[in-house]
Image (spheres, rainbow, N blue to C red):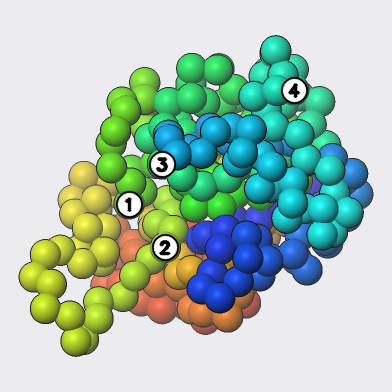
Amino acid sequence: MKSLIIASTSTIHGSGYLEYLLEELKIHFESVNEILFVPYARPSGISHDEYTEKAKEAFAKIDKKVKGLHEFKNPVEAIKNAKGIFVGGGNTFVLVNEIYRNAILESIRAVVLSGTPYLGTSAGSNICGLTMNTTNDMPIVYPPSFKTLGLVPFNINPHYLDPSPNSTHMGETREMRIKEFHTYNTQPVIGLREGSWIKVKENEISLKGKLDARIFEYRKAAYEVETNSDLSFLK
């Protein structure tokens, strides 16, 4: 049974790394004793070892072990043997480039569709959609393709921000950027605010967390959905 948590962010204001999600993660990874962490999204400033250590510290609070994918000689075999998978945030272009370079896209997709529980935050959530084209990140590398895992039938915009009524910024809002995306693409996009996540159980897709989400559909006006709403209609 497909089981995913697709979170807008790993850290919310005033909270530690993954702290706001830990109770949910206890349930999500209930049958798992070790989680395979994919640290590929960090381009600089923190090594894969340091990033993995950060994940280890968080999961230790719920008595789960973590091992980094970079520690394995054969990443494809590591994915196939994983009991649970966590793909962390960073830069989505870097993450997708590394996923293609290590030839693990299809392996991740296959094991998750077969029931391996998956957690994604930020960039790790972007790749759950049909493409990575609604990321907020700068294109600092050029991956072979923008096609991603396609584990849900829409795209995701993590860290979604509403326009501030007191801002003097005159550039494009996040909503305007997503409307530009729909000039050339037709799949729905979920604007996922920080502190919210999408929970997938087989064919059931629902919004979780304290905040509503903003939905963008091709040739339709954007609209809000409340937390705990069923999102399975988005196709």
The Cα atoms of the two marked residues, 2 and 4, are separated by: 30 Å
Taking the image as shown, residue 148 lies to the left or right of residue 121, namely left
Question: Which of the numbered marks, if any, corresponds to residue 159?
Answer: 2
Which residue is denoted by mark 4 in the rendering?
78
The Cα atoms of the two marked residues, 3 and 1, are separated by: 9 Å
50 or 107, nearer to the observer:
50
Residue at image point 45% right, 70% down:
193
Which residue is denoted by mark 3 in the rendering?
91
Q: Secondary structure at mark 4?
A: helix
Q: Amino acid at mark 2?
A: His
The Cα atoms of the two marked residues, 1 and 4, are separated by: 29 Å
Residue at image point 55% right, 17% down:
102
Residue at image point 51% right, 73% down:
13
Q: Secondary structure at mark 2?
A: loop
Q: Amino acid at mark 1?
A: Asn
201 or 14, nearer to the observer:
14
2 and 1 marks in contact (CB < 8 Å) = yes
2 and 4 marks in contact (CB < 8 Å) = no
Which residue is denoted by mark 1 in the rendering?
136
103 to 164, vertically: above or below: above
Q: Residues within 10 Å of mark 2 (few under 14, many from 20)?
A: some
